[in-house]
């Protein structure tokens, strides 16, 4: 029969591991939850991602957006992630995948990255982080850049499109900050 103390220790270790993996990065801007495939598809379609684009995924997680954008759209992709285990998973996936030459991975804080080379920014972050992101986007994005966000809007910006089914917002810089009529929230 299994030692009850050993069993309790293993269960505790698993619980601590799961809590760490999911919640550690809350302190920085969002916990871990992969962007659902349907939302990734809407984000890349809304942004019209293609081979001439440079996609910045802010909080790359384990790569739901990074690898799809590089493989399916042929885009150059920069993924930034703060949590080291996810960075390791991203690096392993890149090493084993076909689009490795188009993918740059950075271990660090997304608020310290320079977004000027980005033509597309993708995000699935908590509302507080979206608020902190806004002034940085406004000072660094080039005209024509697209921002696509899953779940949470950029506060104070006007979305050019919103897909209710997958909960994805599309913004174009600088039009998004100029105001205007927000899209109906009835899908695309
Ligand atoms: C909701 S997940 C989205 C993951 C990924 N974009 C995807 O499509 O699956 C948010 C990710 O952002 C990361 N994150 C949160 N704050 C961050 C920060 N300040 N800098 C870099 N990454 C951050 C978290 O560790 C987490 O992996």
Image (tube, grey):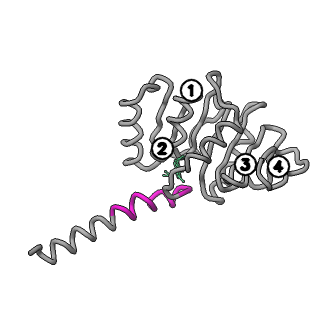
Q: Earlier in the sequence, mark 2 or mark 1?
A: 1
Label 3 Cα neighbours within 10 Å, binned few <14 / some 14-19 / many ≥20: many
Q: Earlier in the sequence, mark 4 or mark 2?
A: 2
Mark 4 beta carbon near ligand 1 (under 8 Å): no
Secondary structure beneath dot 3 equals: strand
Secondary structure beneath dot 4 equals: loop
Report the mark closest to the observer, 2 or 3: 3
For this rendering, which residue is in front, 151 or 173?
A: 151
177 magenta-colored? no
Q: Position of residue 34 (x, y in %)?
A: 51, 51
Q: Which residue is mark 3?
A: 169
Which of the labelled discs sits on residue 108, or is there none? 2
Question: Residue drawn at (56%, 30%), measured in percent from left and top?
Answer: 72
Label 2 Cα neighbours within 10 Å, binned few <14 / some 14-19 / many ≥20: some
- Distance CA(mark 3)–CA(mark 1): 22 Å
Q: Earlier in the sequence, mark 4 or mark 1?
A: 1
Q: Which residue is mark 1?
A: 76
Which of the labelled discs sits on residue 158, or is there none? 4
Mark 3 beta carbon near ligand 1 (under 8 Å): no
Mark 1 beta carbon near ligand 1 (under 8 Å): no
Secondary structure beneath dot 1 equals: strand
């Amino acid at each position: 029969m299994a030692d009850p103390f050993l069993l309790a220790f293993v269960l505790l270790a698993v619980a601590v591991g799961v809590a760490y993996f999911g919640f550690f990065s809350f302190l920085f801007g969002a916990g871990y939850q992969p962007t659902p495939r349907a939302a990734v598809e809407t984000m890349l379609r809304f942004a019209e991602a293609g081979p001439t684009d440079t996609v910045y995924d802010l909080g790359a997680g384990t790569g739901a957006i990074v690898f799809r954008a590089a493989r399916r759209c042929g885009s150059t992709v920069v993924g930034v992630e703060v949590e080291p285990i996810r960075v390791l998973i991203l690096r392993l996936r890149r090493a084993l995948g076909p689009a490795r030459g188009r993918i740059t991975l950075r271990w660090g804080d997304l608020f310290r990255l320079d977004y000027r080379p980005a033509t597309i920014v993708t995000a699935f972050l908590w509302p507080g982080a979206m608020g902190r992101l806004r002034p940085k986007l406004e000072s660094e994005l080039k005209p024509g850049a697209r921002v696509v966000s899953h779940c949470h809007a950029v506060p104070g910006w006007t979305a050019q499109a919103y897909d209710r089914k997958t909960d994805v917002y599309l913004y174009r810089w600088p039009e998004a900050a100029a105001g205007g009529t927000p899209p109906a929230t009835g899908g695309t």
